Image: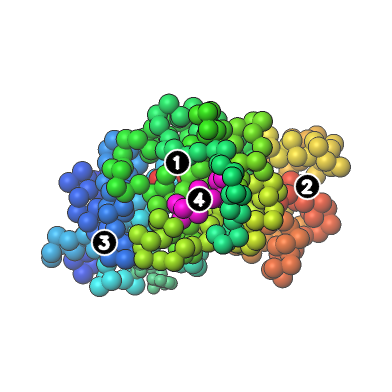
Amino acid sequence: MILEQQDTTTTYNLGDGLRLRFATVDDIEPLAQFNGRIHGDHGFSEFIAQWTREFASPSHPTCGPEWVTLVEDTSTGQVVSSMCLIPQTWTFDGIPFPVGRPEAVGTDPAYRRRGLVRNQFDVLHAKSDRAGHMAQGITGIPWYYRQFGYAYAIDLDGGRCVYPALIPALKDGETEAYRFRLMTLDDVPLVMELYDRDCSRSLVACPRSEAEWRRTNFDVMPPAVPYSLLTIIETTEGRAVGVTRTGRELSWRGMFPVRMFNVIEGQSLRAVLPSVLRWLKTEAETVASAQQKPVPTIHFELGEQHPAFEAMPEVFHKIIPSYAWYMRVTDVPKFLNHIAPVLEGRLAQSALKGFSGEIKVSEYVRGFKLKIEQGKISAEAWTPDDSDQAMFPPYTFLQLLFGRRSLSDLRYMFPDCRAEDEAVVVFETLFPRRYSNVMPIG
Ligand SMILES: CC(C)(COP(=O)(O)OP(=O)(O)OC[C@H]1O[C@@H](n2cnc3c(N)ncnc32)[C@H](O)[C@@H]1OP(=O)(O)O)[C@@H](O)C(=O)NCCC(=O)NCCS
């Protein structure tokens, strides 16, 4: 396939009458029907169909038909495989970097295992790299995306659970001190403030503009099919003190997901949590009964760390280990140069302040040199040879880069991850383990 000169009218003949091309507005409804059918866990998913209409629409802020590929069978004119890539900007400790997010990857059962998805990844990766995306990230089925240059590198979906039966009931004569109502447009500034605070705790984050909050919560989804609901927590006098974001369906783990929970500065988390938990329990019951399921466990899908877990540890009975974002970074030295100010800050705060040196790093299939001069950091591509001071099996370095694992974790996991003494100190200083919880643009 010629990937360099591609534009939105380029088509690729895959043989057997199959043709790969970018979508047009005329494809939006057939794609909505295709994705609703392929991705519905329990029959056709109206949510997926509606979401497809959104991301494939020219009015989507970053995606649109030119970021959607499809394979059609020219003998029937039917879509038989499709995926998209949603451009967005994430931050690394505050430094913005452009990301492409592949999504809605699916092939009709009759056409599977013929490389249709592999071909679409080739096309969309070429386009994404050309657009300057410094990374691609996908939340996806186990193992599969490793084949396309991805490694699990950022925590996803982990958190802690609360068993509904153990939520403390109101005492006799006691009334709730907090109440709950759906977010309105007037609440957007508050939600943004609380969300931005969450982002500042997260090494990798996805900032959202006011327009994005409005788009996803008020403009695009008919009320019958939203993915999640934002609810304002307020005092009985009507003073807003916090927000929750909850799922409208049980998660793939069969639990009721809480995807955001935060309170304003000065509001005690411990004071508000009992009312929040009682309210979540009733929400969880409603969602579960619509799916004919028993009362589910409430899962605070907020990652490994959250202030709520510390505020009321006695109710968060179980830790749910994180799944992970698959990440792909084609040009690691470029990425390192981009985030050099963060790395230089880490160096300046450490025992390595003032250190100068050069570390040659092998990722076996590629490599880079990391140079440190008077506190300044730069990186360049390097073809691995016998003089490397650190070795990482392909793509595992991304776990270190994005803070999911430490160097000692990686050395424990992979015998072919090695580092000489000086490289150990440098990497432990530059790449500590860090919490991340990314809420992407969809
Ligand atoms: C998973 C899915 C998208 C694969 O589509 P596909 O068109 O069969 O994928 P491809 O043939 O391009 O796959 C590329 C490679 O992965 C292999 N492969 C396909 N499905 C696989 C699977 N489920 N697990 C592991 N490997 C798989 C193929 O054999 C191929 O290998 P090869 O190039 O070495 O021959 C398809 O099975 C599907 O639509 N499933 C239901 C929806 C879904 O789960 N989507 C993913 C959501 S994250």
> Separation of disc 4 and disc 2 at Cα?
41 Å
Q: Secondary structure at mark 1?
A: strand
Residue carrying label 3: 44
Rendered-image quadrant of the C terminus: top left
Left or right, residue 246 beside residue 339? left
Q: Amino acid at mark 1?
A: Leu
If the picture is divided into quarters, which one holds ligand 1? bottom left
- Nearer-the-camera pick, 9 or 411: 411
> In the current view of this chain or complex, which residue is farthest to the left?
76
The residue identified by callout 2 is: 429
In the image, is residue 282 part of the stretch drawn in magenta?
A: yes
Badge 2 amino acid: Thr
Q: Say which quarter of the image contains residue 166.
A: bottom right
Mark 1 or mark 3: which is in front? 1
Task: Compare marks 1 and 3 and give the one earlier in the sequence.
Answer: 3
Q: Determine whether the residue tagged by mark 2 lies in a helix, strand or loop.
A: helix
Residue sitting at the far front: 173
**Which residue type does callout 4 highlight?**
Leu
Q: Which mark is residue 230?
A: 1
Crowd tier of the residue under label 2, counting other residues whose Cα lies within 10 Å: few below 14, some 14–19, many 20 or above: some
Residue wearing tag 4: 280
Q: Could you tell me residue 216's position as x and y percent?
A: 38, 39
Q: CA distance from mark 4 to mark 3?
A: 28 Å
**Alpha carbon separation for disc pair 1 and 4:** 12 Å
Image x and y of residue 300, in percent: 56, 53
